[in-house]
Amino acid sequence: MRVIIAGGGIAGLTTALSLHAAGITDVTVHEAVEEIHPLGVGINLLPHAVRELIELGLGDRLAEVGVATADLTFLTPRGQQIWSEPRGLAAGYRWPQYSIHRGRLQLLLLDAVRERLGPDAVVLGSRITGLDHDADLLVGADGIRSDVRRALFPDEGEPIPGGDVLWRGTTYGRPFMTGRSMIMLGDRTQKLVIYPIAPPSEDGTQLINWAIQHRTDVLGVPTGDWNQPISVSKVLPHVQGWHCDELDVYGLVAGAEQVLEYPLVDRDPLPYWSKGNVTLVGDAAHPMYPTGSNGGTQAIIDARVLAYALANGLGLEFYEEQRRPVTGEIVLANRKDGPEVILKMVDERAPQGFSDIEYVMPRAEREEIALHYKKLAGFEPTTLNARRSWSVTLDR
């Protein structure tokens, strides 16, 4: 079976590794850029994605460059705690959760593809624009502006703006809380997530990722400006006065060497992903808001299920049955803020703060919101720990 993959990002490279592990080795990845650099900011890999990467033999490499997330805490802009929960192994999962630099993750996957499939398995400076290719299967893994998706759905149009702008940056700073913590502050107008994406360096600092999602005019950010560098001075007024006992929020944002501006966009769920010998994975199939840390995670799971389906003769129908309904629900849930909706709800109920969170949002309600999203996205601990593996047993 000959497979061509359009796109050499996380989705495309993981698809290549998954196919190879399943015994499908005639695989070529075509990436439009001439050279892959470790660009970008942070990404979270939830336990159900880390499980797949560990089963692909990448566990040690992930542990070297990522941070095994220990806990997640929600705060008001005043620094009042709303909710805190353990993450990864501390939450009872059999696999950790990792926070990692997106570019370093991409290079890790690229190195693994070249080692296992050969140095020519990834063709740079090669863009796939149509569906007519000499392959048994064409996989569109070419992102939210996918050419393969456009060929399948030529009348779909541009990504849908959500009315928010995202500002993202990284700053070297001292470890906060456990040194493996995520914190999220927010209200009805914006939210800020902060987490480390690399182990501490020799000088005791570590690279910390931060991202602000701010409500703005829908037309305020051109939807084509995906990595628009801006001055940090544009962002600082939006975190003026925001407080966290464990961290200087304003100082962290002010210390960023570069700030990137993104529009918040996604696409409506599709009625199908596959047609003939073509299918979609990752953002090409289900671009979603970066809520709940699920974009990259779901792309990795797509890759593994697709390889499982093909290796076991189950076809693209099985792949879609397993993945399309789930990811469609996540896309829609993320438009409603997913588990992060508690920031908005608490601000609506107690805009001036509170003396006891129990009177504003009882613990049972907070637990239900967190658990509901985990079940929806496929990483409720007990279910995930008991779920079958997507690995294919090969007789070699």
Image: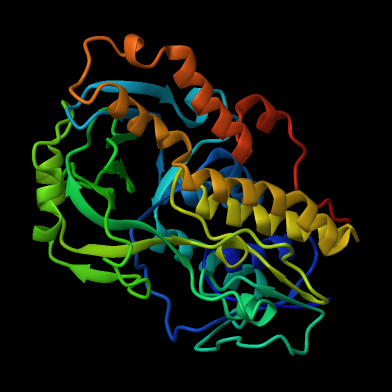
The image shows residue 396, relative to residue 139, as above or below, that is: above
Query: Residue 349: x, y in percent?
Result: 31, 22
**Considering depth in this image, is 123 or 120 the residue closer to the camera?**
123
Image coloring type: rainbow
Q: Is residue 247 left or right of residue 224?
A: left
Frontmost residue, 145 versus 68: 145
Which residue is pictured at 46% across the width and 29% down the height?
Answer: 87
In the rendered image, which quarter contains the C terminus? bottom right
> Left of 198 or right of it: where is 278?
right
- Residue 320, quarter of picture: bottom right
x%, y% of residue 44? 44, 47
Q: Is residue 313 above or below residue 66?
A: below
Residue 202 place in picture, x, y as percent: 20, 46
Q: Is residue 178 left or right of residue 21?
A: left
Residue 255 vs 110, above or below: the answer is above
| Residue 286 in which image quadrant | bottom right
Quadrant containing the N terminus is bottom right
Q: Which quarter of the picture shows residue 84?
A: top left
Rendered residue at 56%/38% (across/down): 47
Name the residue nearer the viewer: 71 or 337: 337
The residue shown at (49%, 13%) is 364
Q: Is residue 29 visible?
A: no
Tell me how many marks there are: 0
Viewer can see residue 286: yes
Q: Position of residue 252 (x, y in %)?
A: 15, 45
